Image (cartoon, grey):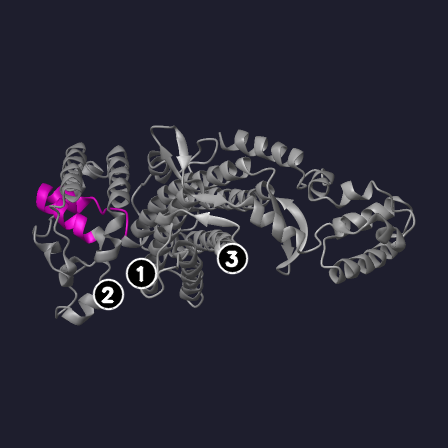
Amino acid sequence: MSKAQATSAAPAPSHNQLDTKAQAWSALFEEPMSDLVKRYTSSVFFDKRLWQADIAGSLAHAEMLAAQAVISAEDHASIQRGMAQITQEIESGAFEWKLDLEDVHLNIEARLTQLVGDAGKRLHTGRSRNDQVATDVRLWLRGEIDLIGDLLKELQVSLVDVAEQNVDVILPGFTHLQVAQPVSFGHHMLAYVEMFKRDAERMADVRRRTNVLPLGSAALAGTTYPLDRERVAKTLGMVDANGSPVVCQNSLDAVSDRDFAIEFTAAASLCMVHVSRLSEELIIWMSQNFGFIKIADRFTTGSSIMPQKKNPDVPELARGKTGRVVGHLMGLITLMKGQPLAYNKDNQEDKEPLFDTVDTLKDTLRIFAEMVGGQLNPATGHKEGGITVNPQAMENAVKRGYATATDLADYLVKKGLPFRDAHETVAHAVKAATTHACDLSELPLAVLQGFHPQIDKDVYEVLSLRGSLNARSTLGGTAPAQVRIQLARHRARLG
């Protein structure tokens, strides 16, 4: 008798065995679970979003079981037929999710058994909900990481668009929120492109460690059935860059590992920190005291009492949501810190923070890509709205901060003065400009020569904002020529 025939010949429980939670695992229990405990332990109303991953994992498992002659070809065909109907029911909204069945896995399995009978009960051969849920979360998160990668690309493109339009716009560069040196506004925007580029790289790295198959580890110790786990991994696309299957190598670790969820949330937290830093600058720049930019009306709100107000609610809320995502990271780390091997019910608490982190990050990236870059107007083929830059306000702010003081020091160094002496000389010049309420470039040549006799009329080119900008032409510098090189690099990278 074949393994498939032996399995088929085994007595099967009634079709109603999975209809109540108290009977879902065995007949050992003498009393039903209380309604309070049902509600407390149930996860179906948040983990049902895993249904596609659950069905995909089940179909791959069933195909392998049939190939290994653990179940019959007929049972495999019945499982495929039943899963196709369940998919249609869930997509149409006709599927009934039952609290009594605790989670997404038992709900789908119970419906499958209703539809195809004993074949549905044989599907769980060689696996446990422990390795099943670990597989489902990995499959689901893999898809979400791919979507987040696309959104990070869209945001980078929006930032590159704004940078390209404002290469020659001069912005006061700040340290300690004090005017420091003039920079290209395009250069400033590209700093965030670099941040989000690293975020995309981190997400790709997290994806690689997420895309590993736990299925076949069963409850914690593996299984006695002749499973081909690598076949399942290939079916589910859990392969490395060379197309080789990637499978968890230790059954205990496979069912209890949530490093991938923590690592994703850490990467998401850092990405949100970058969003929050950008948000802080947009909020400051939009304020009347700065007036550097305007944000399109559709991303702002008014005041219920002050009619003149236009509030940057989107950046403010993103700044606030950053704390929410970082909080989820702390929650997941704390969740795992005291757990012994292997699976524990604590791990049910991994899903809500993970799900919310994914949702928050996706929503934030999507809205920021549009808020920064604007919407495409089909009539013109150009993006409209988004961030509008006020170059004059930025240039006025640079002039108030003696932003070319370092340029004057560099000028004196090239005349032979040691840098520390040049630094001290320029400090006296700044004090004089402050006294006269003018910019360094507005001091008469005779006054400047009073600080050092080698200062000549060519100093005014050095002290000009444009001259300062153009002088910083080393790789990665703010000179417009360098910014355009970086723009070309990013355009080629982003496609």
Residue 470: which disc? Answer: none
Q: Amino acid at mark 2?
A: Thr
- Image height check: is 348 above or below 104? below
Residue 284: which disc? Answer: 3
Label count reads 3
Q: Amino acid at mark 1?
A: Gln
Q: Spatial distance from mark 1 to mark 3, Cα to Cα?
A: 41 Å
Q: Main secondary structure of the magenta part?
A: helix
* Percent coordinates x, y for residue 81 in the rendering: 14, 35
Relative to the observer, which residue lies in front, 236 or 321? 321
Q: Spatial distance from mark 2 to mark 1, Cα to Cα?
A: 9 Å
Residue 41: which disc? Answer: 2
Q: Earlier in the sequence, mark 2 or mark 1?
A: 2
Q: Are marks 2 and 1 in contact (CB under 8 Å)?
A: yes
Is 408 left or right of 388, judged from the image as shown? right
Give the secondary structure at mark 3: helix
Which residues make up the magenta segment?
106-128
Magenta-span inclusion, residue 116: yes
Q: Please report the residue visible at 92 percent of the width from the left and 50 percent of the height from the top.
A: 453
Q: Earlier in the sequence, mark 2 or mark 3?
A: 2
